[in-house]
Amino acid sequence: MSKKLRVATTSLAGCFGCHMSLLDIDERLFPLLELVEFDRSPITDIKHCGPCDIGIVEGGVCNAENVHVLHEFRKNCKILIAIGACAINGGLPAQRNHLDLASCLTEVYLTEPGLEHGHIPNDPELPLPLDKVHPLHEVVKIDYFIPGCPPSADAIWKFLTDLIAGKTPELGHGLIKYD
Ligand code: SF4
């Protein structure tokens, strides 16, 4: 039997919906696991991406930790895939891009009622937010994009099985969507 491909996944500034769609391939997970083994992913709890054949990244880049993780994936994955609207164009989190970050933090934590902190959180454990939320391709080279919010399980299945078979992935009519 040929060696299994190694696959890593992560969620940056996303809602995990794209990962849920991946898990929605349901019983097809069993044949998939005959072909691949998972590195960093929600089902292995590995904390750092090691050398992999395929990396799948959900979500855009909104803070310094996202930048670090994305570079780690790019360095270790032969093929890097941006999955979903947030990864491809920033998606919902990028709606803050037309606002000034400092003003947002001041309003939320200092001037508006509701929160009792009295200060803007600055624990060194917290990743520094970026001024803007970036799509992945603005930070590293991306090899493939799977659109949708989220893409359907059938689209993800078709894309991955094409790729694993050594073919250029093709999402035909009915599998590409942008909402
Ligand atoms: Fe969630 Fe949609 Fe973003 Fe995927 S593209 S992480 S489903 S908001």
Image (cartoon, rainbow, N blue to C red):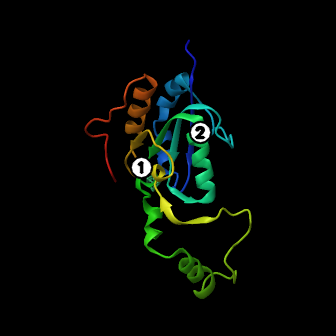
Residue 5 in percent (x, y) is at: 55, 25
**Which residue, given by chain and number where applicable, does mark 2 sit on?**
75
Q: Label 2: state its secondary structure.
A: helix
Judge the density around disc 2: few (<14), some (14-19), many (≥20) Cα neighbours within 10 Å: some
Residue 53 in percent (x, y) is at: 54, 30
Q: As shown in the figure, which amino acid type bears the numbered disc 1?
A: Pro
In this rendering, the answer to whether 66 lies above or below 43 is below
Looking at this view, name the residue that lies furthest to the right.
124
Image quadrant for the N terminus?
top right
Question: What residue is at 38 percent from the left and 32 percent from the top?
Answer: 158
Residue 134 in percent (x, y) is at: 48, 58
User: Tag 2 or tag 1, which sits nearer the N-term?
Assistant: 2
Question: For this view, does 122 lie left or right of residue 101?
Answer: right
Disc 1/disc 2 C-alpha distance (Å): 26 Å
In this rendering, the answer to whether 151 lies above or below 98 is above
**Which residue, given by chain and number where applicable, does mark 1 sit on?**
150
Question: For this view, does 168 lie left or right of residue 86?
Answer: left
Quarter of the view holding residue 43: top right
